[in-house]
Image (cartoon, helix red, strand yellow):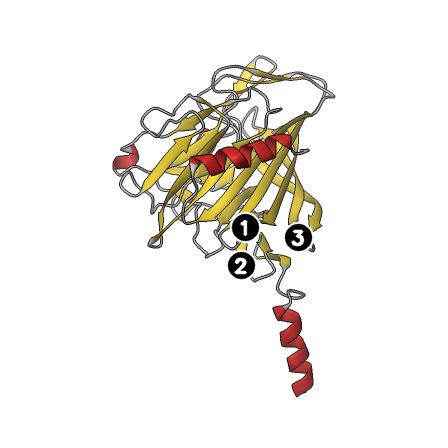
Amino acid sequence: MRNYLIVLLMLTFNGVFAQQVRKENGVLKLIDKQGHYLLGYQYEEVYPPAGVDSAFRRSGFIHPLNTLSGRTLTRIQAPDHYHHFGLWNPWTRVQYKGKVYDLWNLGDKQGTVRFVKFNRIKDSGKTIGFSVKQAHMIFPELGKEQQLIDEDWEVNITPIDDKRYECTINSTLSVVGDDTVTLKEYRYGGLGFRATGQWTDKNSTLLTSSGKDRKDADGSLERWAIVSGMTDNANAGILFLSYPNNFNHPEPIRVWPPGTNGKGDVFFNFSPTKNKDWVLLPHKQYTLHYRLIVFDGALTASEAEKYWKEFAKSSP
């Protein structure tokens, strides 16, 4: 028995048992070789708090997104925006057969995005992750729903060092049926990030590839943006990278200005349809590639530019 325990401890130390991708209470958990819980993908519907309209329920989003030290950077269902879900990617103005539907603002009850099934799960090797099928749904009338867009959402995490790792998010969209779908110009839509409630105007910062901050970044065209702040008494954050082949790259961004909700809550969004329509034709595929560098401590502008150049040269 003693020898068995020694072998078990050795295997765990060497990472044989420590690295896991496992399902638990409706969440697919990505855990690295050292046992760090880095990312949770919510595949079962999460309902809002008691007393809040159940229309605000959703599946198919990332929360938590944690740093290597265990600091959680995402937030879901904040009382000011019950439709915010950590890292998530609905579209706000979706035109179909002459009508426009909102899949972002769930309280309007016009549509949603939901998990359908797992395509694959990669639970071993340097990179771990998953691919899922997600359905972008509209509610054309009370009691009826229809899928407009089929999405393959692929998420992978790869270690960098003892303070950083990369998370790639690839979204491939295709129209369901034979009719064109247009993602209409609007100030936000696509991959959004609602930051931890610990971040405020006083303890968080934003810096973009063009040198802008929260005061003037909204609507700017960017290759990358660093969003960071004090989290559990230490600095942590995310570098968001947009791939050169993405629609409307360098991409417009949506950034909440200082003073939001009275204290400076943080929201960031690569919003490729912020300044132009995106027409999705039937029988074609459209892919957006993003890479996130999740870090403890600090990350400089020169480092961000280096990460972006490496990403730009990579194969998506």
| Residue at 66% across, 46% down | 130
Mark 1 vs mark 3: in front = 3
x then y, percent, for residue 209: 45, 28
Label 1 sits on what residue type?
Answer: Leu
x then y, percent, for residue 56: 46, 39
Using the rendered image of the protein, determine whether residue 144 is visible from the camera's viewpoint.
no
C-alpha separation, residue under disc 2 versus residue under disc 1 = 9 Å
Label 2 residue SS:
loop
Residue 22 found in image quarter: bottom right
Label 1 residue SS:
strand
Q: How would you rate the neighbour count of disc 1 (Cα within 10 Å): few for under 14, some for 14-19, many for 20 or more?
A: many
Q: What is the residue that sits farthest to the bottom in this orientation?
A: 1
Q: What is the residue that sits farthest to the top in this orientation?
A: 98
C-alpha separation, residue under disc 1 versus residue under disc 3 = 15 Å
Residue 153 versus residue 44: which sits nearer the camera?
153
Mark 2, residue position: 36
User: Image check: 279 left or right of 109?
Assistant: right
Mark 1 vs 3: CB contact within 8 A: no
x then y, percent, for residue 166: 56, 44
The answer to whether 29 is drawn above or below residue 209 in the figure is below
C-alpha separation, residue under disc 2 versus residue under disc 3 = 14 Å
The answer to whether 300 is drawn above or below residue 178 in the figure is below
Residue 210 found in image quarter: top left
Mark 1, residue position: 39
Mark 3, residue position: 126
Q: What is the residue that sits farthest to the right in this orientation?
A: 283
Label 2 sits on what residue type?
Answer: His
Count of residue discs? 3
> Which label number is shown at residue 8?
none
